[in-house]
Image (spheres, grey):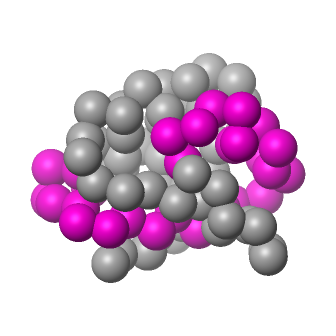
Amino acid sequence: MQEVRVYLNSIDRVKNFVNTISKYDAEFDLISGRYVIDAKSIMGIFSLDLSKTQILQITNGTKEVMAAIAEFMVE
C-alpha cells in the first residue's frame, strides 16, 4: 500500500483525477480526517473539503499509476 497527498481544488481537477485513476485496476481511497472515500467516486470526492489536501491510499499500485497521478500530488 502506498500513500501520497493530493490536492483536488477544482471541478476540472476532480474530473481529470477520477478519469485518470479509473483506467487502473488498483484500489484508491481518499482519506480526509475520519472519512474514507472511494477515490473513483466523483460524488464521494465532492463530499470532502477540497480546500485541503487529501491522503490518497493506493493498493496494488504500480510505477505507471504513480506517474499518471503525479500532476495531482503535493509534497
Q: Quadrant of residue 14?
A: top right
Q: Is residue 20 magenta?
A: no
Q: Does residue 39 lie above or below 6 as drawn?
A: above
Query: What residue is drawn where x is 69% and y is 43%?
Result: 45
Query: What residue is drawn where x is 59% and y is 68%?
Result: 55
In this orientation, does residue 56 appear?
Answer: yes
In this orientation, does residue 51 appear?
Answer: no
The span picked out in magenta is 39-67
Position of residue 54 measured from the top left corner of the image (x, y, whole percent): 65, 62
Q: Is residue 65 magenta?
A: yes
Q: Does residue 70 lie above or below 52 as drawn?
A: above
Q: Does residue 71 lie above or below 28 as drawn?
A: above
For the residue pair 26 and 53, the one nearer the viewer reads as 26
Position of residue 68 measured from the top left corner of the image (x, y, whole percent): 27, 42
Q: Does residue 35 lie above or below 48 as drawn?
A: below
Q: Is residue 38 left or right of residue 27?
A: right
